[in-house]
């Protein structure tokens, strides 16, 4: 899945208050071709990408979106999680989320990572409880103590 370079070009161009026709003229392409690029209907790369980055005063890497590509992969993993995979998402939704709302996309990816880490920690702890005889014995003692406290409370409640 390619990063949405066109959306970033469009957002940067608009933030610099450059018209589509003006940018197209600066980089030597037609406004309609730039429109196709900005709407992610045509790929851009090589010398043209470098000229666009130069005129938008931005690094080429910021337009190609290596970080965004990683974020897209993280979102793919989050959306494939059994908890959310049955939800009906639009095919291009993740790309648009990364392009238009990168902070929100990052938050979703970060929350999924934290959730996955918590599940893994719980699984590791459960495995350790099952396999470590000392922890198993301590857990048994704790549960026995809780049972004794409950029994005592029930006896005291019956006396009142």
Image (tube, rainbow, N blue to C red):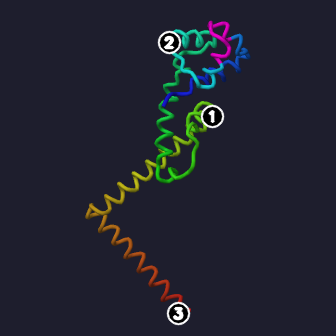
Closer to the N terminus: mark 1 or mark 2?
2
Q: In the image, what residue occupies the spot 63% across and 25% down? A: 39
Point out the stretch of residues depicted in magenta.
Answer: 23-34
Say left or right for 129 vs 94: left
Residue pictured at 35% horizontal, 54% vertical:
124
Where is mark 3, residue-wise? 159
Of callouts 2 and 3, which one flags the residue occurring earlier in the amino acid sequence? 2
Distance from Cα at disc 2 to Cα at disc 3: 86 Å
Taking the magenta stretch, the answer to whether it contains residue 123 is no
Q: State the CA–CA distance, disc 1 to disc 2.
A: 26 Å
Q: Is the residue marked by circle 3 packed among few (<14), some (14-19), or many (20+) residues within 10 Å? A: few
Q: Is residue 58 above or below residue 147?
A: above
- Mark 3, secondary structure of its residue: helix
Dot 1: within a 10 Å radius of its alpha carbon, few (fewer than 14), some, or many (20 or more) residues? few
Q: Position of residue 97 (x, y in %)?
A: 60, 36
Q: Nearer the viewer, mark 3 or mark 1?
A: 1
Front residue of this view, candidates 70 and 42 = 42
In the picture of the structure, the residue carrying the numbered disc 2 is 46
Q: In the picture, residue 151 is in which quadrant?
A: bottom left
Mark 3 vs 1, N-terminal side: 1
Residue 22 location (% of width, % of height): 71, 10
Instruction: Look at 30% across and 66% down and name the residue there.
Output: 136
Q: Secondary structure at mark 1?
A: loop
Residue that appears at 57% across and 45% down:
89
Q: Which mark is residue 101?
A: 1
């Amino acid at each position: 899945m390619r990063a949405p370079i066109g959306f970033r070009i469009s957002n940067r161009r608009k933030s610099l208050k450059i018209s589509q026709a003006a940018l197209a003229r600066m980089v030597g392409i037609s406004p309609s071709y730039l429109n196709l690029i900005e709407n992610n209907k045509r790929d851009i790369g090589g010398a043209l990408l470098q000229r666009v980055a130069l005129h938008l005063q931005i690094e080429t890497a910021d337009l190609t979106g290596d970080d965004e590509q990683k974020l897209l992969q993280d979102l793919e993993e989050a959306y494939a999680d059994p908890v959310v995979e049955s939800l009906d998402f639009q095919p291009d939704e993740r790309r648009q989320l990364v392009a238009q709302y990168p902070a929100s996309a990052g938050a979703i990816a970060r929350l999924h990572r934290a959730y996955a880490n918590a599940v893994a920690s719980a699984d590791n702890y459960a495995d350790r409880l099952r396999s470590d005889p000392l922890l198993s014995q301590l857990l048994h003692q704790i549960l026995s103590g809780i049972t004794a406290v409950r029994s005592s409370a029930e006896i005291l409640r019956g006396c009142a």
